[in-house]
Image (spheres, helix red, strand yellow):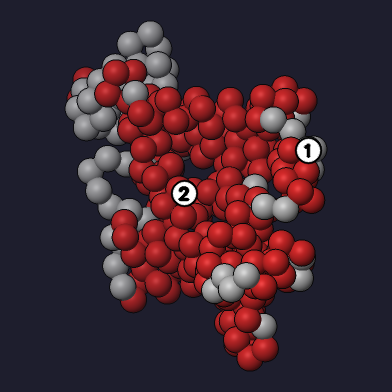
Amino acid sequence: MTPRVAGLADSRPSRKRIFLTRPRVLVGGILIAIWLCGALLADILAPYPPLEPHYSHRLAPPDAQFLLGTDELGRDLFSRILYGSRISLTVGVVAEGIAASIGLCVGMLAGWFGGWIDDLLMRVAEVFFAIPALMFLIVWVTILESTPLLIFVGLGLISWAGLSRVMRAQVLALKSMEFVIAARSIGVSQWGIMYRHILPNAISPVLVLIPLGIGGAILSESILSFLGLGITIPYPSWGSLVDTSRNYFTTAWWYAVFPGAAISLAVLGFSLLSEGLINP
């Protein structure tokens, strides 16, 4: 790394300072930490197994025994939301990981090689930009299947294009800098330059967008589950809880409100974190 680039790196604020001086980052980080703890410690925090019915307490309102009430089979809603956080957060992280991997590779190749490779890859990105995300996901899971892997891939495919543009812009700005020219002059291969010099210096703007993408993936999966097209496994996602609550909204308001609040708070947390990093 050249002195110029090293100086830029040294001038970046520390992680502690970022959290203390940026309220949105702090609030977003707290919300995310709460849900991560809930997902990781669900076996400890959940008062009941998520699939255990209590038929004598069906659609019971929130009380001391059932903190957030119960569903139509008497299952504890608080426990189901905790276990559902594992599914919803996994969907967001894995789907955005797929999107980031595709976006980084496409943006790197387009920005570095330019020419017809750049034109081709950016035209493909524009095609994915033009496709309505929800319509694509509905067709995707209808033609294929609502398995976790296919939903992860579908969510990743609708999210990579924006990341590729950001990465491409960074590569275009960096590839004419002195440290890249110096690496070329001593015989470093193109792939070596991209991996060792371009990627570490270009990835930061992409990373700050990833939390926003995770929140978007959680929301998209929740919409699919609400439409009956989401992940179908024994433990519920937040979207599937909202879906099954539709028939009981007038008689059991808590059944829809609390899972919906979980979705909103998780998406809000990731959005605040990303926006706080982008706009101090």
> Which residue is more in the foreground, 18 or 6?
6
Residue at x-position 39% and y-position 45%: 90
Quadrant housing residue 162: bottom right
Distance Cα–Cα, label 1 vs label 2: 32 Å
Position of residue 268 in the picture relative to residue 218 (left or right): right
Position of residue 84 in the picture relative to residue 232 (left or right): right
Q: Element under label 1?
A: loop
Residue 86 percent across, percent down from the top left: 36, 38
Label 1 crowd (10 A; few <14 / some 14-19 / many >=20): few
Residue 200 percent across, percent down from the top left: 60, 54
Q: Is residue 77 visible?
A: no
Q: Label 2, on which residue? A: 92
Q: Is residue 128 visible?
A: yes
Q: Label 1, on which residue? A: 11
Residue at x-position 78% and y-position 43%: 7
Q: Earlier in the sequence, mark 1 or mark 2?
A: 1
Quadrant housing residue 76: top left
Quadrant housing residue 196: bottom right
Q: Amino acid at mark 2?
A: Gly
> Where 4 falls versus 265 (above or below)?
below
Answer yes or no: do the residues labelled 1 and 2 have beta carbons within 8 Å?
Answer: no
**Between tags 1 and 2, which lies in front?**
1
> Where 45 falls versus 168 (above or below)?
above
